[in-house]
Image (tube, grey):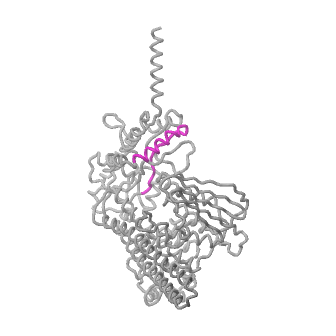
Amino acid sequence: MKKFYIALIFFIILITGKLHAQHEIMFSDNYPPYNYLNNEGKLVGFNVDILNAIKDIYKEDVFINSGEWYTINRALNNNEIDAIGGIHYPGSLDPNFIYTRPAINTSHCFLYNSNFHNKFSLEYVRTTKEPLIAMWKNDVLIRYVQSINPSAKFLFVTNYTDFINALDREDVTCIFGQRICAMYYAKSSYKDYVKPLNHRILERSMGFKVSKENPELAAILNNGLEVILANGEYQKIFDNSLAEYDEINNNWRIYLKYITLIGGLSLVILIFLIIVNRVLQNRVRTKTKDLREQLALNSQIMEELEEQKNKAEESDKIKTAFLANMSHEIRTPMNGILGFADLLKNTDYSSEKHSKFISIIQQSGHRMLDTINNIIEVSKLESGLEKPIIKAVPIKEIIRELRNFFHPEATLKGLSFVFKEKDSTLNQPFYTDEYKLNSILTNLIKNALKFTKKGSIEVSYSLHNGYAEFWIKDTGIGISKDKQASIFEQFVQADYSHTSGFEGSGLGLSISKGYVHLLKGHIKLESEPAKGSTFYVRIPNSIDNQQLLDKTTPTETPDLSILEKYNILIAEDDEISFVYLENILENIAEQIVRAKDGREVVELAKQSKSIDLIFMDIKMPHLNGFEATREIRKFNKEVFIIAQSAFTQENYKHKAKEAGCNAFISKPINQQKLLTLISKVTTEKVYF
């Protein structure tokens, strides 16, 4: 009987302990510095510290254990545990498990022995004859190395100790593997002469893999990661566990392309500011002329004259607000670009700060480019150059993409972001201009996000055979009655004073209204200050408008890896633009030759029959790009010519095509778009 009571007590303790430990998470015990057993046999590492920090926040009962990789995966597959930490995410959807947001991204790099190599680079690996590279036997890694140097030889290893020790052999050129793990073993072995290249490749996300039966644990881990990222605890863990193994060798050449980009962007901005200033001056002259003519009329039209005067005064207010707004919208991102570029140039920072500063520079550049693009769109609408391109549009797909795109921003602001489909009866294709419809909805949602600090944003839509309706409702600051009449005018916000606290050029709603009218639709506003606003848009189905149908057929994304080595002639009189093109083309160039004016590019094309590709700037001394292209086509019909220009008007593209160019690309030039265009022109023979 005594034995029975002892067994019963033991069983109760066992069950109680099991119930108390609500979740069990396991880690691999041999993946330093992410998760491993230290000399005392204790499980430590970056991923373990991340989980402990989340436990401290939620006070959850989580039992942490470790084991061999095969053992812990089998335990999760058999539902013996709730999750695995420190796992690399697969490249495809896994319906059997829940993957949390990444705790960190890992990457691979080349590492070398600085005692054997004073200068080592990716170019050295590329040009060395039969380099011997130590690495794991992995098909993806092998193919990547062979894409750099097909003559490479391999020394395959099975553990990190052999991996690092391989660098002590003089016949080993370098090693290639996981960056942070490799540097951990190098520093643990006191091999300070082991150095990594800054070139990172094959990045993968690492986080938690959770049983599909335990979604509440996945939610705790996701929310916990958000909290420790926000309160600075994540950075402390990273600094304590990984920072010393993730240092970057500084090299001023890394930032040359960003300095070049900044210079080119500044030049474009200056040109557009001059254009905008002239446009505004012409508007003021026109208004002044109208007022002087009205003053010459007799006293019977004095009432109309007074009305015109008031309109002119309102125009001056708008112009003043616009100039102040444009100054702010351009100087603010310029402050970010020039300020952080100066920091990158003069001071050494950690890799994380480098990445953060570069990201700020890019964000500032995009913000400035958005301002310029808005001005261009308004100019095209005013001049009547903008025409609709009607084709079948997948409206529900557009709605889904908008929801996915704006949801993170709404979540970051703590807003409820809801999409609702009302009574729809659409059972046939819906025809309209996809770009303009997307732009209308994007501007209205961005407007709602900008002016809503708390509460919710609701996007409702209803699709029918004859029309589509959209409602964008927010709980933001609202718009007073006296401002609602002018809110769709150019360069106007509900409050365009310096104290409004909201960035933006004030062009978004004006563009939206212009596009709605261009599509023969209707837009209206209902709003109340401090309670919110609702924008309503109705777009007709233009299925009967067959003469506007877009006849173009989309082409598949080309494979850039098949690009050959070309002899390239760059016709560019601007030094910064040439340096930028030279850098982004160097990987596909056998030889690059430069011409600084139109006559020189014609002479070089005559002298060298081996030129494969010409980048023709439109604005050049002596002969412009159109004239130079016509001269070249008189004696060379085969060479590929791509026109490049800061002028983006459609008539420039037509002129380039008529002159004999194969394609046209506008500045600022994006590297990926340029390489894709080259692939289409040279391999698929796809022009314009």
Q: From which residue to which does the magenta span run?
A: 201-228
Q: Is residue 222 visible?
A: yes
Q: Position of residue 612 (x, y in %)?
A: 49, 78
The residue at 43%/33% (across/down) is 63
Looking at the image, the residue that sits furthest to the top is 1
Q: In this picture, is 86 found above or below 276?
A: above
Q: In this picture, is 80 found above or below 554?
A: above
The residue at 37%/63% (across/down) is 128
Q: Quadrant of residue 459?
A: bottom right
Q: Is residue 569 magenta?
A: no
In the rendered structure, the answer to whether residue 574 lies left or right of residue 99 reads left
Q: Position of residue 212 (x, y in %)?
A: 55, 40
Q: Position of residue 547 (x, y in %)?
A: 70, 75
Q: Quadrant of residue 386?
A: bottom right
Total count of labels: 0
* The C terminus lies in quadrant: bottom right
The answer to which of 324 and 211 lies nearer the viewer is 324
The answer to which of 319 and 188 lies nearer the viewer is 319
Q: Position of residue 103 (x, y in %)?
A: 43, 47
Q: Is residue 173 visible?
A: no
Q: In this picture, is 195 found above or below 615?
A: above
The answer to which of 591 and 97 lies nearer the viewer is 97
Q: Is residue 208 magenta?
A: yes
